Amino acid sequence: MQSTKSQYLFFTGKGGVGKTSLSCATAVKMADEGHKVLLISTDPASNLEDVLDSPVSEKIQAVKGLDNLFALNINPEIAAHEYRNRVTEPLSGILPASDIKKMKEELSGACTTEIASFDEFSRFISGENEGNQFDVIIFDTAPTGHTLRLLELPAAWASFSKENPDGASCLGPTSALKSSQERYNKVVSTLRDASQTTFYLVSRAEKSSLKEASRSSEELRELGLNNQKLLINGVFKALDPSDAFAVKMEAMAQEQLKSIPENLKGLALQQYPLLAYNVLGVEKLRSLLDEKLQANVASDQGDPILHLDGLDLLVEGITKNQDHGLLMTMGKGGVGKTITASALAIMIARKGFEVHLTTTDPAAHVQDFIHQLDAIPPSLTIDRIDPKLETQRYTEKILQQKGGKLDEQGIKLLREDLKSPCTEEVAVFHAFSKAIQQAKRKFVVIDTAPTGHTLLLLDTAGSYHREVMRHTGLHPDKIKTPFMALKDGNLTKIILISLPETTPMREAAALQEDLRRAGISPYAWVVNQSLAMHASIKDPLLKSRATAEAEVFKNIREGLADRVFGIPYLPTENLLPALLDFYKENIVEKNV
């Protein structure tokens, strides 16, 4: 990591790419250099405490073993909870309790949570709180462009949202923010000042991760946040040239690095190696940025002690006593929802069952995987729900209904709020409804399902629920029936997807909690890209990584899921045929 003169450093990227490790390692390095450093996380699945091996809470605390480093977790859920209370308390006694409950659920989306979190940590940038006591403040997780654009609109601070609470589905009355518009403008000005702020885009040497970094970079540039650097973490180099798997894995990583998106090629780039050990504790954090120290860190190179059952056994369980049903793969971006859905659909269809595979993936990656096959089973049908088209239709209807009552700034605010992920999920739900109806006579596999938050919105009594029903164009019974079908464990099986690493596991656990609030219990977990499923690995670095997966497997089995299955890490571009062949060629040791 090159030294920086910026006071504010932001690390952003998809879950599991290593932004927490790199932000912590940077904080340790700068503290070692004599700077007084504050490290702040706004990640709902924050594992700062684990990575630093030191207590971290919602109050600033010194990190043990380091004189100049302090850390703080801003709990986004608590921030959002307080925000919701500030929105609804003035209406208590005026509106019925059912309407208050509905409003709180409407304000439970990702957008509200992020806005509330940004409101909290913006005070460290504006010089309030204790922010002015530190030489450097490092943020693990940066705000999205959507949040910044939304708060930048003057209408977001006016009476529009207060007088029209239904006009903004995620933001709600902005008077509930602790920030003033003056403070917010000061913060944004600081973020745009390259001498004060640097944005680190953290990625892995893989297409989906680089694509996310590319999107984030573009969003930040549109807002004038141009001081960006690209960090590619976990670049693998084989230690054992006789291990064909390791050599192929290295070649694939190098090939991916050649396809860096155009808008990232002009950024200063630094690469960090895939290490044989989990980066936990100050000593290992120092080694992440210092190759000489890496050789001194001991790592376990023993044989992996746990294995996962494969998708073939998951399919056996699903089809054992049933010839129809709904399967939904759910999880954060980049964890493997699409490959899981595609593989399940093909494997079930190959057993002779009628299967329909559908997706809301904007990039249509399902077709990319399916095209890798020489042929598909005759009992399989495939289509795609276009979320952009569905959202456009929904947005136009909302604007037509409400736009006539608003001024220009109000319309801009409404348009920006309708760009939120919540809007897209609500908009595509009616398209899911058709697929769900088919699941009563065949197997239907859906890639990229609505979150628990969206499902709760659709089941909430009150005006918002009626509004959704009006704009889907379906009869009210058609809305209720699909939702009830999702809660029917005999018909619907939710498959949660994770990677064999701590952060993706925690993110999947948070999604599971969200679903359970909606009365939906996931059927099984699938852990993607598992090295432990390969018995023939010889490379010492990969063997250590495989051994480290055991802790994640244990945590999932003991506290999160009764059924856990795995997809092996496969170093190939033609992933779907390779995965299907894997189950034919390998005998995976069953769990003890």
Image: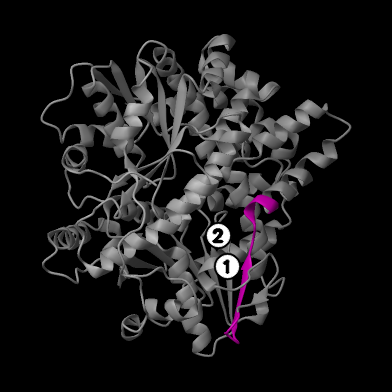
Mark 1 touching mark 2, by CB under 8 A?
A: yes
On screen, residue 167 above or below 267:
above
> Relative to 157, is 447 on the left or the right?
left
Q: Which residue is mark 1?
A: 49
Q: Residue at x 39, y 63 (%)?
A: 201
The quadrant in which residue 257 appears is bottom left
Q: In terms of depth relative to the viewer, which is nearer, 267 or 346?
A: 346
Crowding at dot 2, Cα within 10 Å, few <14 / some 14-19 / many 20+, comes out as many
What segment is highlighted magenta in the picture?
Answer: 64-78
| Label tally | 2
The quadrant in which residue 274 appears is bottom left
Q: Which residue is mark 2?
A: 46
Nearest to the eye among marks 1 and 2: give it.
1
On screen, residue 229 above or below 249:
below
User: In the image, is residue 67 part of the stretch drawn in magenta?
Assistant: yes
The outermost residue toward the bottom is 34
Q: Residue 570: which disc? A: none
Q: Amino acid at mark 1?
A: Glu
Quadrant location of the N terminus?
bottom left
The outermost residue toward the right is 93
User: In the image, is residue 339 part of the stretch drawn in magenta?
Assistant: no
The quadrant in which residue 574 appears is top left
Element on which disc 2 rests: loop
Residue 392, how many percent across, how many down?
A: 44, 28
Residue 468, how many percent across, how many down?
A: 58, 21
Residue 441, how many percent across, how many down?
A: 38, 10
Q: How is the image coloured?
A: one colour
Is residue 195 at least partly visible in the picture?
no
Q: In terms of depth relative to the viewer, which is nearer, 387 or 316?
A: 316
